[in-house]
Image (cartoon, grey):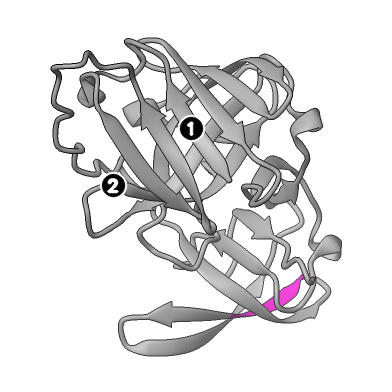
Amino acid sequence: MQYVSMLRGAWGPLAGGVLLLAVLGGIVLLSQSVGAGDVPPEAPPFQSPPSVPVSAADIKLIDGARLVIVRQTRAGTSEQELNVPAAAAIERLQPIALADVVPGDWLTVVGVPNDVKNFSILSLVILPGAVTPGDAGVARSPAGFAGHEPLRDPRARPILGGPVLRVEDNVITIVGPTGEIRVTTGLEAPARLYRIEPASITDMREGDQIAGEFDSDMPGALLWLPVIVG
């Protein structure tokens, strides 16, 4: 089971309340202490940061620098052939362990809104080293990705993030907008924890997921999510 708990003063919209989030069969908890007579407020609505013009796709065929991808559009499923330039910036979402997270990294919590105005958490994404967040407080990789882009759910967005302050046992503490946020990952239902790192097209496999600006058949940047079997 996974929890995200927020220390007193950590996130203004909670105002001392409790917010439960579903995650991969477990629970994510955003909480602050409340007095005996306090009534927790209604959970805040999901606020999506500005999105970048990228699309998610599945890799159907790889032939050198040529990729055939399958995308889901409003009109249905469509195939597209890409010729990836040698100078294209290619990054991957590399699965990692908690032991790989170090102070100074940037942690982004990725999720989607659910029917009760809370959030369903999909993944935790690490950007290594010191990162300066951009618009809406969203940090991006050198190729311009936040980490949610290859996910098949088009609603996926960064929910919150901040620099890692410390890692103790299965707890990652980050510095949020107004205080510390504790991200606790249990052993029974571990979160999908990734690090964005440089990659090569030669590492990709058919069936993997990618994201990029596919208005052009020669994308300048791709974020690759390897499919994990088993």
* On screen, residue 175 above or below 66: above
* On screen, residue 6 above or below 206: above
Residue in view at x 15 percent, y 19 percent: 38
Where does the C terminus fall, quadrant-wise? bottom right
Residue 142 seen anywhere in this rendered image of the structure: no
First in sequence, mark 2 or 1: give its number.
1
Answer with the quarter of the image where residue 229 lies. Answer: bottom right
Please give the residue where the numbered disc 2 appears in the rendered image: 118
- Left or right of 52 on screen, residue 172: right
Question: Could you say where residue 224 lies in the image, as x and y percent from the top left?
Answer: 67, 58
Residue in view at x 58 percent, y 46 percent: 1
Question: Could you say where residue 47 lies in the image, as x and y percent from the top left?
Answer: 24, 41
Does the magenta stretch mainly form a helix, a strand or a loop? strand
Residue 73's disc is none
Residue in view at x 57 percent, y 19 percent: 173
Q: CA distance from mark 2 to mark 1?
A: 13 Å
**Which element type, helix, strand or loop, lies under badge 1?**
strand
Q: Please tell me which residue lies in front, 126 or 122.
A: 122
Amino acid type of disc 2?
Asn
Answer with the quarter of the image where residue 225 lies. Answer: bottom right
Please give the residue where the numbered disc 1 appears in the rendered image: 4
